[in-house]
Amino acid sequence: MITLPNLFVPLLALLGAGVFVFGAWARARAGEARLAGRLAALEQRVGEQQQALERAEAARAAAEADLRATEQRYLIALRGSQDGLWEWDIASGAVHLSPRWKGMLGFESHQLADDLAAWRGRVHEDDRAGFEQALADHLAGRTPRLDHELRLLHADGRTRIVLSRGAAIRDESGRAYRLVGLDTDVTALRRVQAVLDAVADGTAGTAGTRFFAAMVQHFARALQVDSAFITECADDPPTRVRTLAYWSAAGGSGSNFEYELAGTPCEAVIHGARDCFHPEGLERLFPIEQGFEAYLGLPIVGSDGRVLGHLAFLDRRARDEEMIVERVFRIFLARAAAEIERLRLLARESSPAAPARALT
């Protein structure tokens, strides 16, 4: 016979096992819930990060598109410029030299290669180190832009002075991958400055005959011509002129002389009150100027509008229009006219009966 205590013990054991199993199950479900919560949070975070990446990628793509559009507008504007455009793809080493850049140096487009050697080979050897340093400074970010003056070799062997300005195009890390620039020919401007400085410095503090002598000497040296002289009209209406100062590369300052205008290129300057420039072939047109190839004459006009004399230059070589530094000439022609009129006034005041035209 089974007694109650004997039956209760197994029941208690079974109940305890059930409680244990249920607790384990409950703990497992709670762990699963916590894990699911973590997974959900991670999934949400991943989703947010994915959205952020997509937004960043879209922003980057838009920025690149804007950069390309800006670059294209910049290049279109540069290519329409009258200055010489050059482009350097730094990664590949490819160089593009525009037809205008090549033409500025006297080359047809096919006569000069589009490469680094052709580009840097046109830089004057004395200016290469400075130009290379300017490029390196800009590419390294030490300067905001390339802005450097240098000399380039022209096809005819002469040099052209250019202002080279450019800007690097950089990636998002700031690394330069392309350089685009413009070269502006400033030869004429620098020549004007050089002539102005030379003549202004050479004539500073002078007056009268000393001014005329200094003026022709420093003009001749700055323009690198064989001879220069300044005259006044010797009669009225003018048929003859006399020099107030004469200078030649061979003999320096020379004695003054008087000559007939007929048969000389000076006749058109005095009678026409206009500039007269013969860049070549002078002795064929005026046999009296034997041995000279080029001539430039400029009238000296008084305060009453009459021609008082002229400034003239002769050279044994053919010359181009770079010889004409218009703005500088006008300054010193006005000064010469004032000096001639001043000396004539002094001559009249000191000797009322004497002819007013003689200054020598």
Image (cartoon, rainbow, N blue to C red):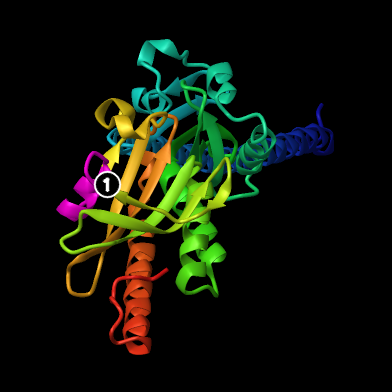
The residue lying at 35 percent from left, 86 percent from top is: 351
Q: Quadrant of the N terminus?
A: top right
Location of residue 309 in the rendering, given as x and y in whole percent from the top left corner: 29, 60
The residue lying at 34 percent from left, 70 percent from top is: 358
The residue lying at 46 percent from left, 41 percent from top is: 56
Q: Foreground: 130 or 228?
A: 228
Outermost front residue: 353
Q: What are the residue bounds of the magenta stretch?
A: 261-276
Task: Give the answer, above or below, for where 218 lies relative to 136.
Answer: below
Location of residue 355 in the rendering, given as x and y in whole percent from the top left corner: 28, 76
- Secondary structure at badge 1 equals helix
The residue lying at 36 percent from left, 16 percent from top is: 108
Location of residue 225 in the rendering, given as x and y in whole percent from the top left corner: 47, 41
Location of residue 257 in the rendering, given as x and y in whole percent from the top left corner: 41, 53
Residue neighbourhood size for the residue with mark 1, other residues' Cα within 10 Å, grouped as few (<14), some (14–19), many (≥20): many
300 on left or right of 50? left
